[in-house]
Image (cartoon, rainbow, N blue to C red):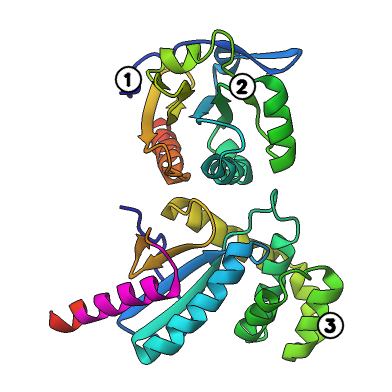
Amino acid sequence: MSTLKPPLNAQDHIRGRPDAPIQLVEYGDYECPFCGRAHLVTNAVQRAMGDDLLFAFRNFPLTQVHPHALRAAQAAEAAALQDLFWPMHDLIFENQQFLEDEHLFRYAALVGCDLDQFAQDIDSEEVAEKVRSDFLSGARSGVNGTPTFFVNGERYDGSWEPEVLLAFLQEMRGVRELR
Amino acid sequence: MALEAGKQAPDFTLNTTPDQRVSLRDFRGRNVVLAFYPADWSPVCSDQLPIYSELLPEFRKLGAEVLGLSVDGVWCHLAFAKNRNLRFPLLADFEPKGEVARAYDAYRKGEGVSERALFVIDREGIIRWSYVSPIGVNPGADGILAALEGMQQGRQS
């Protein structure tokens, strides 16, 4: 059984209540078309689950296959240093055909980043290291492609069609309730 | 059942390009990850090998080189490696077909392809970890990393 290593921690970008009973973690690549679809799915399950769900995203850019993936990940992490990870994350996925620097900087401006700071951070060692350490944590956790999901720390190998994933999460929520 | 930990890794010499040959014994003194996979271009292989390519710096920190092996020929390997930007050699277990996979007990006779099998071989040429994944399941890299890290700790202690 593949487990999430390390578990969720302060380095992670999370959406939803930190103490939510169900934790969904995605390893994703901003240039991967499947992750683009998964973005809609994770949004839908977050809406459906409300306070019962925490969602976190970790970077797993396959840079040899997706030439813009690393830069896009670094752009999201640079925005994160200004507490703007999620708006940047959403905007990048919604526009994943357009990931050149000119686009990434435009997205940063749109979400309200200080652009001078963003320009410094996107090339910083700190941001590069964050993306790299996400990738390695994925490799150690048994990520074998993108997107890969973990639910409460265990790799989820089922379908991530919205109905199927949601049913799984809700069932898990129910099981926890019964304990 | 693939060859298991503790066995001597059978040596081999295979072409990686039309005029380049690679032998396992060339890597004595280094750890080697052998990744047998069924076929270039198949969807699962196309995800699996780029992850190893991405992790090469990590594998090298752990003293290891990666070799991919399938029964595809060198020209097919060249096109596949170029398309996926793979940065480690792909070896053609092509003639006699699957001979190396058979030596590692990792050949699927019915289909004529190798298993999706991983072997981690130490500096002395001994298999230290092996794993056969269900043919349609990408085994990822966690098992390889754990094996290499365990070997490194063993050397340090």
Question: Label 2 marks which chain's residue?
Answer: B
Q: Disc 1 on helix, strand or loop?
A: loop
Give coordinates of residue B68: x percent, y percent.
57, 29
Picture layout, residue A52 above or below residue A137: below
* Callouts 3 and 2 on one subunit: no
Residue at mark 1 to residue at mark 2: CA–CA distance: 24 Å
Q: Disc 2 on helix, strand or loop?
A: strand
The region drawn magenta spans: A159-174
Dominant secondary-structure state across the stretch colored magenta: helix
Q: Earlier in the sequence, mark 1 or mark 2?
A: 1
Task: Give residue A51's quadrant in the image.
Answer: bottom left
The residue singled out by tag 2 in the image is B91
**Of residues B15 and B134, which is closer to you in this image?**
B134
Picture layout, residue B146 above or below residue B72: below
Give coordinates of residue B89: x percent, y percent.
65, 27
Q: Disc 3 on helix, strand or loop?
A: helix
* Number of the label disc, if any, that sits on residue B125: none
Q: Is residue A172 magenta?
A: yes
Query: Along the horizontal axis of the image, is A121 left or right of A169?
Result: right
Task: Give residue A22's quadrant in the image.
Answer: bottom left
The residue singled out by tag 1 in the image is B6
Tell me if I can see residue A103 in this picture: yes
The residue singled out by tag 3 in the image is A116
Query: Which of label 3 and label 2 is nearer to you?
Result: 2
Q: Amino acid at mark 3?
A: Asp
Query: Which of label 1 and label 2 is nearer to you?
Result: 2
Residue at mark 3 to residue at mark 2: CA–CA distance: 48 Å
